[in-house]
Image (spheres, coloured by chain):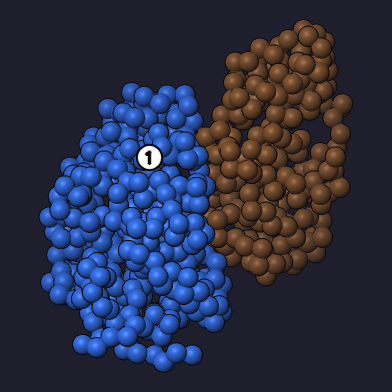
Amino acid sequence: MPAYREDILTPKERFDAFLTGAPMDRMLCMPLVTSYAAKIAGRTIKEYQQSGKTMAECHVVAYDKLRYDLIYLFTNCSYVAEAMGQPLEYPDDEPASCPDPIIKSEADLAKIRVAGADDGLFPVYYEAIDILKEKLGDQVYMTVCFSGPLSTAATLRDVELFVKDTYKAPEFCHKLLRMCTDSCKNFIAKLVAKGVIPVILEPISSGSILSPKMYDAFSAPYSKELVDYTHGLGSPVALHICGKTNKIIGKMADSGANIISFDICDLAIAKEKVAGRAVLLGNVTPADVLYMGPKEDVKKVCEDALEFMKDYKPGFILATGCELPKKIPYEHLEAMMEVIRTTGVLPYAK
Amino acid sequence: MSKEALFKDIANAVVDMDADSSTRLCQTSIEQRIAPYETITGGLMEGMKEVSRLYEEEEYFLPEVLMSSEAMNAGLDVLNPHLDKSSMGQPIKVVIGVVEGDTHDIGKNLVRIMTESSGMEIYDLGRDVPLEKFISKAEEVDADVIAMSTLMTSTMDGMKEVIDRLKQRNIRDKYKVMVGGGPISPRFAQRIGADLYSKDAAEAVRTLKTTFGKEQ
């Protein structure tokens, strides 16, 4: 086994080096620790989702223990919809869900609004960001992940009804998508102003649900609009799709996003389709080896990914394919971080 | 129009997601005094079989399967009032649901659509189903299969709980237990003692038909 080496650079220094092509002490690793931070800190997911102070505290504890390369704030897939007027349910220790989508018909568009920057629980994030910047801002970059236009529209309408609408009432879909896109922009503007990297999340656009053709018609134009908008504000941006992306990973890169964050897709395909265009971030599936273990298998999967992607340009970040569910054993996360500090170390002299 | 040509058109209407044509053509089949059972198996179900193939080959996705299923249901609405139920063979009976604590039911709905359209009798318990309900419903309807789905890791253990309860009551062998869903792997299925695993709706149909020796 290669020798374990303590980090030399801070995650922020390492990330800067990564982006500029300067030497790094090791490769980058970001298990998508989101509400899992609440588990590490001994808080409930409900507390984590509803209080910026708690969210920040949880991430400080989680980061101190694992020292991964990005802090990744995310609560649930429905909070942009919530900011547009959709009521959610908050279970005690699970991410909020949307049991009763508000848009029953086109007339119900009147029941929602384009979310302003301070609507819904957006301010929870701002509070968390401010605290985290003060405590860790010199060491590590922060990202905020939020459901993009298509996934938000599907939440407001109900996924099955929405995908049928793509055939039955495409204009209605586009009206709803317009409102969702504008809501995302308002949130993005404030995130960028706070120096945070936005991550557009589009699980409903995945190849587990939509065809590449439908992706082109209903998801890609809006993702691209958000990417262009974020670039216009002077910030990099990531696009994350969990589920299958074998057939759309190249299209994801067409959005112009700086980081493509992906889940179920052959690394060889991702490499071929995205090469030279975007950083790849992925794709250890949380529910498989990371959940079932054993630790040796977790390490093997991570080592293989690093080995396969080591020459990839503009760069690879070892990550999980989706946020970590609370049942993932903590020692499996430690195993992942251990791999980045053994297999992932690079020759470096300060 | 010959019966065969009509069935082919009905199958095509399903594949083309065309509910209006499906309705109209099924009405024609009634006017031509074709036994509704034959129209269902030879037309509508053949169409859904092709949809299932297209889904498996990633030509069709969720929207297309749902739209085709609507076209099939439009035809069934026409045929069902005329259907002589005694003409149908003994179908495989499946109790299906998303386990307690999880409300993600897209995958389960796809399995319901595909199994139902291949002639199985489906008892859909919906989502967030109390574990006991799987057993009581299976006992009540004398089911052949208990099928459980989940997308969340936090609810996976509910599947094992159902299997354990079946064992405790000495009724484990009465049922084939099938599991599936995002985080479920063949390895997990084996670990909890499930009989069958399927990765998607098309495979679920094949697996069940093979298991019960009904594959044509």
Mark 1 burial class by Cα count in 10 Å: few <14, some 14-19, many 20+: many
Query: Can residue B122 be seen in the rendering of this structure?
Result: no
Q: Which residue is drawn at 27% across and 78% down?
A: A24
Query: Can residue A192 be seen in the rendering of this structure?
Result: yes
Q: How many labels does the image show?
A: 1
**Is A238 situated left or right of B179 in this image?**
left
Quarter of the image where the C terminus of chain B is located: top right
The color chain A is rendered in: blue
Q: Residue at x 54, y 50 (%)?
A: B128
Residue B212, percent from left and from top? 84, 48
**Is A151 situated left or right of B35 in this image?**
left
Residue A122 against residue A27 in the figure, above or below: above
The color chain B is rendered in: brown
Quarter of the image where the N terminus of chain B is located: top right
| Residue linked to disc 1 | A219
Of the pair B176 and A6, the residue shown nearer to us:
A6
Q: Which residue lies furthest to the bottom in this view?
A: A3
**Is B196 situated left or right of A183 in this image?**
right
Dot 1 falls on which chain?
A: A
Residue A335 against residue B65 in the figure, above or below: below
